[in-house]
RNA sequence: CGGGGAGUAGCUCAGCCUGGUAGAGCAUGGCGUUUGGGACGCCAGGGCCGCAAGUUCGAAUCUUGUCUCCCCGACCA
């Protein structure tokens, strides 16, 4: 048995033998924290894989972020995972700020629970059904209303504990007939699903509004403009419902909206009152004779990617599953519910659709896998190596995440890879520049390049 | 689920029509020349031609079945 972990022993046994450079033990013998591209698992592709049609899918494959494992099911490689975690972090922070509390439910659920709500039979083939060794019927959760309602009814015993807003960020599975567009319509996907419980309609409406606002903030932090649209409530049920769409040419939904939204979206604090009066709907709800439908010259038609969906559920599930709370007078009250979803993994596709060019991705800083790509144009050159490592340490100490391209490769390869993976800043250090005391700083989004001293570059990146 | 297309080297694909030693470019490894925007030369490694059955002296190629993947449509975060 030979494993890389055995290498140090072998080396010790052969003490005195001339040192042999070995790539597998090289990294193990250097327990430092530098993210070096020479050892980082980043399988980029020069050519476009045949299966990818849209930009985000192509770029996620080419940039070494994901690999398809089966139709609509993906492995997240290190670079992709970092972005996924960043998106997740922003969603989590905004949910917490909105007063929601995080929990984690299982992916596998019992069919009996779904029979209580009547959805085990109603859901259809999109639900992946599984039988365990005891022939018990199980399922891989496509959503979690039943489970959360059970948790709620079993554990909340008084109106004094109300209201409650609970959420999780968990993998879901929906056996789509036709998965496509990479992670934008996968079968397995990461979703934030949140559920609110209140004593009455007013309480439910308040939770709905809080989430509505939280969603606008969440998407904005990722550099996206999301338009809330009156929408069909679909299979999940309920009456009040909004979809949040990112405008993109490759969007799957047709949408119509009042141009006034564009001006409104530019502001920091969005006035809900004004917003709620604006016309914005998906194509199936579009009605040019509607009272608030603007005249043709103020009506915009576009394509949208649905990244969030919120519902007022009423007592649909609390009634079916007997989720009641004793009120102040001892009476039993059915919980008024709402549910709120964000497609976390889909967002990554949506962000790339919004931020890319023909060379690659252009990450907004908030979700970028690293803030800075440090390019050493002449790895092995003592001055270049030392300068780069000093820059790396200095940035790290200031909390800036850096990916260091220390590969012994041609400049063109490095520039091309760095443009492809789309880190917001590229810091280029080469022998010619260093000879006159400068490095080059490039902004991936604007394409702007400046030559400046190492100190000035560090100051700019840590500002 | 209806309609269409494709499975051949890590990736992009040719070869199939007309059956006869499995190919190219890129990628990978070695050597040399190079080195500030995806370099060049030479050499090398790499394939149950998706799987199964059939026809045939002989199948990547013909027939049947099957699995997988992609695209268009209907459905969904």
Image: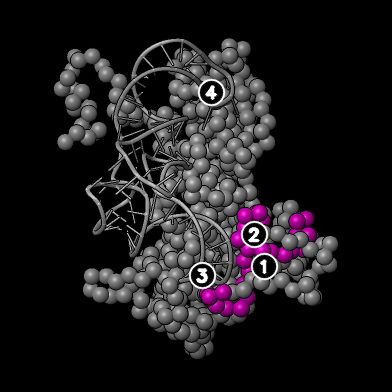
Q: What residue do we see at 38% from left, 78% from top?
A: A113
Estimate how packed mark 1 is, as few (under 14), some (14 to 19) or many (20 or more) residues with alpha carbons within 10 Å. Answer: many
In front of the other: B47 or A416 = B47
Q: Of the residues tagged 3 and 2, which is closer to the observer?
A: 2
Task: Give residue A32's quadrant in the image.
Answer: top left
Q: Position of residue A39 (x, y in %)?
A: 39, 31
Q: Which comes before the other along the chain, label 4 or label 1?
A: 1
In the image, taking residue A90 as reference, residue A155 lies left or right, namely: left
**Residue A294 part of the magenta-drawn span:** no
In front of the other: A40 or A94 = A40
Query: Which stretch appears magenta?
Result: A234-263
Label 2, label 1: how far apart the Cα atoms are:
9 Å
In the image, taking residue A417 as reference, residue A246 lies left or right, namely: right
Label 4, label 1: how far apart the Cα atoms are:
47 Å
Q: Name the residue under label 1.
A: A282
Q: Name the residue under label 4.
A: A411
Q: Which comes before the other along the chain, label 2 or label 4?
A: 2
Task: Give residue A218's quadrant in the image.
Answer: bottom right
Label 3, label 2: how far apart the Cα atoms are:
25 Å
Q: Which comes before the other along the chain, label 2 or label 1?
A: 1
Q: Are marks 4 and 1 on the same chain?
A: yes
């Amino acid at each position: 048995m030979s494993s890389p972990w055995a290498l140090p022993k072998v080396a010790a046994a052969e003490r005195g033998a001339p040192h042999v450079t070995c790539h597998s033990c090289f990294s193990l013998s250097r327990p430092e924290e530098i993210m070096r591209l020479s050892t980082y698992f980043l399988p980029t592709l020069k050519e476009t894989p045949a299966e990818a049609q849209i930009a985000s899918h192509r770029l996620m494959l080419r940039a070494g972020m994901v690999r398809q494992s089966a139709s609509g099911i993906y492995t997240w490689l290190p670079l992709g995972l970092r972005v996924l975690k960043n998106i997740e972090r922003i969603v989590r922070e905004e949910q917490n700020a909105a007063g929601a509390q995080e929990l984690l439910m299982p992916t596998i659920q019992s069919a009996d629970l779904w029979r209580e709500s009547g959805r085990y039979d109603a859901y259809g083939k999109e639900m992946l059904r599984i039988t365990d060794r005891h022939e018990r019927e199980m399922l891989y959760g496509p959503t979690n209303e039943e489970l959360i309602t059970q948790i709620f009814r079993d554990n909340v015993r008084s109106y004094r504990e109300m209201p409650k807003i609970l959420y999780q960020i968990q993998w879901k599975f929906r056996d789509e007939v036709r998965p496509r567009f990479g992670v934008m319509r996968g079968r397995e996907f990461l979703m934030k699903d949140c559920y609110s419980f209140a004593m009455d309609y007013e309480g439910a409406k308040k939770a709905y509004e809080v989430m509505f606002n939280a969603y606008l903030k969440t998407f904005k932090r990722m550099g996206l403009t999301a338009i809330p649209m009156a929408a069909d409530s679909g299979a999940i049920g309920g009456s009040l419902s909004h979809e949040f769409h990112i405008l993109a040419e490759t969007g799957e939904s047709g949408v119509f909206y009042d141009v006034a939204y564009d001006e409104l979206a530019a502001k920091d604090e969005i006035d809900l009152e004004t917003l709620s009066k604006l016309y914005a709907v998906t194509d199936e709800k579009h009605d040019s004779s509607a009272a608030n439908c603007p005249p043709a010259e103020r009506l915009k038609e576009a394509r949208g990617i649905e990244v969030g969906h919120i519902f007022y559920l009423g007592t649909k599930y609390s009634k079916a599953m007997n989720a009641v709370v004793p009120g102040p007078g001892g009476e039993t009250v059915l919980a008024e519910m709402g549910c709120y979803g964000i497609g976390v993994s889909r967002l990554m596709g949506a962000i790339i659709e919004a931020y890319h060019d023909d060379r690659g991705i252009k990450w907004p800083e908030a979700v970028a896998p690293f803030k800075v790509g440090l390019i050493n144009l002449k790895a092995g050159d003592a001055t270049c190596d030392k300068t780069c490592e000093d820059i790396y340490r200095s940035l790290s100490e200031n909390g800036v995440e850096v990916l260091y391209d220390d590969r012994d490769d041609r400049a063109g390869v490095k520039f091309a890879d760095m443009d492809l993976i789309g880190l917001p800043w590229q810091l280029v250090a080469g022998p010619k520049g260093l000879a006159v005391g400068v490095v080059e700083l490039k902004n991936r989004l604007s394409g702007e390049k400046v030559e400046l001293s190492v100190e000035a570059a560090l100051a700019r990146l840590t500002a």
